[in-house]
């Protein structure tokens, strides 16, 4: 009952309330992003969601658009400014994903949406992370986040898929608040400080 109906209902209610209450924060962050990093304030990128369906993820931009002399963007670590790091440390860059939740593309709790290029690299076990909507936060994010290996991260994702419940979601939500407040394990694959998933060794497939 919770997984099929109540979870989605709570996602809509919480996302709506958060969008209304945090609207002043959205405005301030958007203005600061444009002042410090330039336009556009919102970063958009296609990600795989439920059952691997592709959707457009929204985040506040945290990197500049600087390029080299040939027009190729500079490495992420060179474009990530102190202001951008602050956005990620406080998770303010994630706020626009509330719109993804409202649209039904994401959930408040679930495996984080990763990059499209990882899709053909998953084994059957890892692919099960797409049996639920991706989340704003998830089990892996409150159990090590950037300190986890890819295999550990996928194991946590699948563990969540197998144990979706109101109690589990509430526990993850409360732990997320604690992690964000402590600014723990912030580095991730999108920041240029987390190594990309390159696939599985043959013995693991």
Image (tube, rainbow, N blue to C red):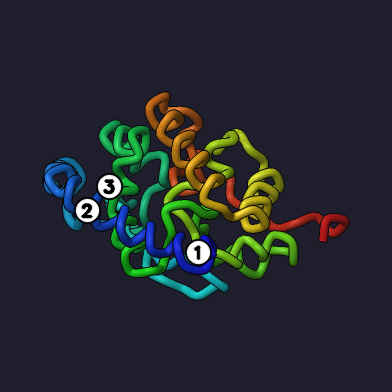
Q: Which residue is labeled 2 in the image?
A: 19
Identified at 52% across, 70% down, the residue is: 50
Residue 78 position (above or below residue 106): above
Q: Secondary structure at mark 2?
A: helix
Give the residue at x 38% y 57%: 10
Q: Position of residue 173 (x, y in %)?
A: 45, 41
Q: CA distance from mark 2 to mark 3?
A: 26 Å
- Residue 121's quadrant in the figure? bottom right
Tell me if mark 1 has few (under 14), some (14-19) or many (20+) residues whose alpha carbon lies within 10 angstroms of its own.
many
The image quadrant that residue 84 belongs to is top left
Residue extending farthest to the front is 1
Disc 1 element: loop
Total numbered labels placed on residues in the image: 3
Residue situated in front as seen by the camera: 70 or 50: 50
Q: Please name the residue that numbered disc 3 is placed on.
A: 64
Q: Is residue 179 above or below residue 28?
A: above
């Amino acid at each position: 009952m919770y997984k099929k109906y109540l979870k989605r209902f709570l996602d809509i209610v919480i996302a709506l309330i958060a969008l209304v209450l945090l609207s002043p924060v959205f405005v301030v962050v958007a203005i600061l992003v444009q002042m410090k990093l330039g336009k556009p304030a919102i970063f958009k990128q296609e990600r795989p969601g439920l059952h691997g369906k592709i959707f457009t993820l929204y985040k506040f931009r945290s990197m500049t658009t600087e390029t080299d002399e040939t027009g190729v963007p500079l490495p992420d670590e060179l474009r990530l400014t102190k202001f951008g790091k602050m956005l990620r440390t406080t998770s303010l860059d994630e706020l626009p994903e509330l719109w993804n939740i409202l649209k039904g593309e994401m959930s408040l709790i679930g495996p984080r949406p990763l990059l499209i290029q990882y899709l053909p690299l998953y084994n059957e076990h890892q692919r099960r992370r797409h049996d639920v909507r991706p989340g704003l936060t998830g089990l892996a994010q409150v159990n090590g986040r950037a300190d986890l290996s890819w295999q550990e991260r996928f194991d946590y994702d699948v563990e969540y898929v197998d144990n979706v419940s109101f109690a589990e979601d509430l526990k993850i939500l409360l732990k997320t608040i604690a992690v964000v407040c402590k600014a723990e394990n912030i580095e991730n694959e999108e920041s240029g400080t987390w190594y990309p998933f390159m696939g599985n060794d043959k013995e693991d497939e």
